[in-house]
Image: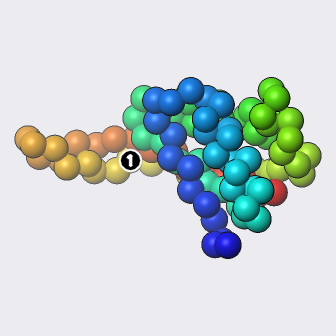
Amino acid sequence: MSDEKIVYVGKKPLHAYVKAVLTAHEEGEKSVAIVARGASIGRAVDVAEVCRRRNGIIASTLPESISLSNTEIGTEEVPRDDGMKPVSFIRITLDF
C-alpha cells in the first residue's frame, strides 16, 4: 500500500475511472489522486463528483466518508515535434 494511488483520466467512459477509484479503495489505499490534462479535465471533475456523491451503482459501494482533500491546477510543458506546448492539468485528491 502506498500513500496515494494515481488514476489518470483520458477518453474512456466515466465508469471506468470510478471503478479504478473503487479498486484502489478495495486494495486498502487511503488516498486517490485523479489526474487529467487538457480536454480530459472536465471528465476528471465528473469522476471526483460521482465518487464523492456516490452516484450510480459502482460508486454507491464506496464509503460515505470520502472527502476532497486537495485540488491542484496548473500548466505543464509537454514536448512536441515543433517544441514545447503548454497544457493545463488538474489533480484532485480524494481521501477515504
Q: Secondary structure at mark 1?
A: strand
Q: Residue flagged by tag 1: what amino acid is it?
A: Thr
Q: Residue at x 43, y 40 (%)?
A: 37
How is the rendered protein coloured? rainbow
Kindly indicate the quadrant of the structure image that contains residue 70: bottom right
Q: Which residue is mark 1?
A: 75
Asked whether residue 70 appears in the rendered view, the answer is: no
**Image position, residue 67 (x, y; %):** 81, 51
**Image position, residue 4 (x, y; %):** 63, 65
Q: Determine whether, in the image, residue 4 is placed left or right of residue 83.
A: right
Q: Determine whether, in the image, residue 3 is placed left or right of residue 83.
A: right
Q: Residue at x 56, y 56 (%)?
A: 6
**Image position, residue 68 (x, y; %):** 75, 50
**In-front residue for pair 15/88:** 15
Furthest residue in direction right, as rendered: 64
Residues packed near mark 1 inside 10 Å, few (<14), some (14 to 19) or many (20 plus): few
Asked whether residue 7 appears in the rendered view, the answer is: yes
Q: Residue at x 61, y 60 (%)?
A: 5
**In-front residue for pair 22/80:** 22
Kindly indicate the quadrant of the structure image that contains residue 39: top left
The quadrant the N terminus occupies is bottom right
In this rendering, the count of numbered labels is: 1
Q: Image height check: is 48 above or below 67? A: above
The quadrant the C terminus occupies is bottom right
Q: Residue at x 34, y 50 (%)?
A: 76
Q: Determine whether, in the image, residue 89 is placed left or right of residue 14.
A: left
**In-front residue for pair 58/48:** 58
Q: Image height check: is 26 above or below 56? A: below
Q: Determine whether, in the image, residue 86 is placed left or right of residue 29.
A: left
